[in-house]
Image (cartoon, helix red, strand yellow):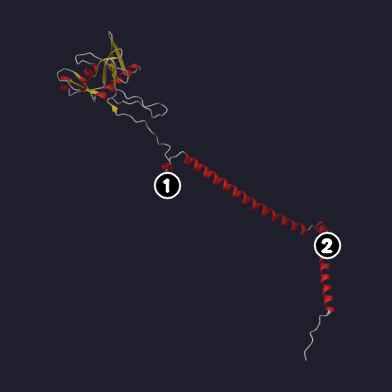
Amino acid sequence: MNKTPATDNPHASLIESKWKTTIVVAITVAALGYLFLRPILNQQFGWKLPDVFEEGNQVAENDKEDLDNQFDRKTSGGQDEASSNSKSQKSTSEDSAGQSPEENASSKTYNSKSQPRSPNSKSNTPRGPPIPGGFNTRGSGSSNGSATAEPKLGQLTTAPSGDFKSTAGLIYGRGSREGTRLKHVMRHAEDDLSKPIHGVFDGKQDEILALIDQAYLMAKKGSNNVTSSKQRDRTVYTIYFSKRIGYVGGQKGKQKKNPICKELSLVLEGDRVITAYPK
């Protein structure tokens, strides 16, 4: 025979429901009692019983503050990165704007290998070879470091009259047995044993004329290394150099093994050259 399944016991369900209700009421009463008694117990015994609701609210507030901080950091980080990328792109475009295509290509290829230029490196003005006597035939340029150099001394230009004018302003005109004063001065570029004494310059024509220009400028500035005397319409300058500018030639010079010369004799009529020679 088949057995009929047992039906639920209404009495047992009623007892279970009453127990649940009793437990909920007990917990509620206990919580209310704790809330009521906590301030009294803390004040009476000096305890620090926690407030359940305050701690819950504090935790919630802390969680909210953490979320806000994380959001701010993400937003700020995104803005900073975007700003940095924008500045980098702007700087790159500005640097590239002033360069030619070849320079841009070279900069992209070799930028990581480029070395900073030494702060002590200088760009000096090119100078001409030193002339006899330790003087330079080329100007030293302007005092502010400009690459523009002064005209080289000893350079000649031809005037309409046929005279020659040097860089310093000396005039080599017609005269003397050689026909021109320039040819007469250049006779002192070589020794002449037909004369008892003959001063001979070191160097070639451009160096000799540069030396004479230098001596003339020293005389105009009133250098302590210059003395002068008058002979009628002529002025005789003696300019002393610290180094050799030539030697004593001629017959007596040869006998004395050609002593060196450090002085230059320059004879002028105004700015017109009569003669110049080492002595």
Question: Which x, y percent locates residue 27?
Answer: 81, 66
Q: Nearer the viewer, residue 245 or 208?
A: 208
Is 94 left or right of 188, judged from the image as shown? right
The answer to whether mark 1 and mark 2 are in CB contact below 8 A is no
Distance from Cα at disc 1 to Cα at disc 2: 79 Å
Three-letter amino acid code of the residue under disc 2: Leu
Label annotation for residue 2: none
Task: Say above or below: 251 vs 146.
Answer: above
Residue identifier under label 1: 109
Q: Nearer the viewer, residue 31 or 149?
A: 149
Q: Furthest residue to the bottom?
A: 1
Residue in the image at 54% along x and 46% along y: 85
Residue identifier under label 2: 32
Residue in the image at 75% along x and 56% along y: 57
Q: Furthest residue to the front?
A: 101
Q: Secondary structure at mark 1?
A: helix
Is 276 left or right of 21, judged from the image as shown? left
